[in-house]
Image: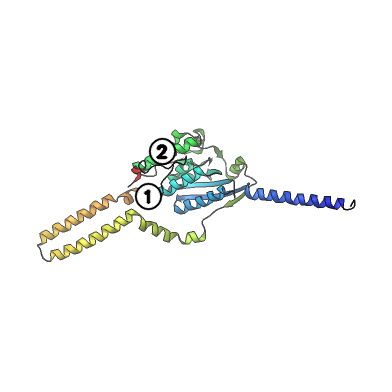
Amino acid sequence: MENRAPLVLTCALLSLTLFGGWLLQCKAAKGDRVILVKISNSIDYWTADLIEEAIRDVDSGKADTLLITLDISDGYLYPSIRIAKLLSSCKGRVVGYIGPEGAAAFSYGAYIAIAMHTLAMNEGALIGRGRATKDAQALGYLLETARDYAKSKGRNALAAERMITENLEYSADEAYDKNLCELKVKDFSALLAALGLSDSSIVEKRKTDSSLDSENGYRLLRLVAEPTTVKYLFCLLAALVLFRLAFAFSRRHSKSKTDMIHQTMLDLVKMEMQDLSILSNYGRSEFPAAYVTRLHTPTDIRGRAKSQKSLGHLEC
């Protein structure tokens, strides 16, 4: 028995060493993992889906930190509202980084940046121009929620409001001085060092090949399902029917009566087209606000669902 004691002790120490290494490996795989998502140019539906997937991984414990780089100049209303809500309610740490130098978070990019748990800006970066829509009612909703996001994160709510009401933009120095961002860094490496993530495992999450392949079909489906598009198609069909009836009528009546009917139909079509000026006037950054209430009822940052009555001003 005495001869076996060193052997047993050696096996026990080896087992503890292997078990400790396994625990450290598990900790590195979970606790020190960072998910990186890059958003550039525009915020669309696929961006919102990607962010939701990344937040699901963080909430499930696969990573501690979600790091989102921003360089945005355009976007859509509904995906931006959805992303801001997801970011604000994420259980893990969400860090937004406007970089590298020369990058900007404009339009809806400024709106989602305010919802980040921690916001960092690279030297030479910009944030602002948050007046992303010409619709006063939708703009009021963005202003109200942006104010709430800023207050809940301890940021300067007034400065956040002015990005929307006055369409202001701030440099990294100005945003840091006005308490719009928590960090001002020289580059991405400096950001990781400031966050204590220099030695962390960073995994970038991108759109899958299948999502990219289905992008055109998905856009077509959204376009066809959009109420404005349906209304356009209905007006076109009604105009064709009316012109066909007018042609049949003109064969039995005088030219003056036929011209009067044609003019009346043209006036009706023009009235309908003016009523649908949202697409022609507001451009790519605008999306029918009815989608916000009909497809996804927004909630405030405390999780309480707002009533349809309080959001009625968003209806088109």
Q: Earlier in the sequence, mark 1 or mark 2?
A: 2
Which residue occupies the foreground of this view, 200 or 32?
32
Which residue occupies the foreground of this view, 293 or 219?
293
Q: Residue furthest front?
A: 1
- In the image, what residue occupies the spot 22% across and 62% down? 241
Location of mark 2 (residue): 144
Which quadrant would residue 192 be assigned to in this image?
A: top right
The vertical placement of 267 against 127, above or below, is below
Residue 13 as seen in the image, left or right of residue 226: right
Q: What is the three-letter code of the residue carrying label 2?
A: Glu
- The answer to whether marks 1 and 2 mark residues whose Cβ atoms lie closer than 8 Å is no
Crowd around label 1: few <14 · some 14–19 · many ≥20 (10 Å) = few
* Labelled disc at residue 266: none
Residue 62 placed where, x, y %? 59, 50
- The Cα–Cα distance between marks 1 and 2, rounded to whole angstroms, is 20 Å
Q: What is the three-letter code of the residue carrying label 1?
A: Arg
Residue 216 placed where, x, y %? 43, 60
Location of mark 1 (residue): 294
Crowd around label 2: few <14 · some 14–19 · many ≥20 (10 Å) = few
Q: Residue furthest right?
A: 2
Residue 166 in view = no
Numbered-mark total? 2
- In the image, what residue occupies the spot 35% across and 55% down? 226
Residue 112 placed where, x, y %? 47, 44
Tag 2 secondary structure: helix
Residue 275 placed where, x, y %? 27, 50
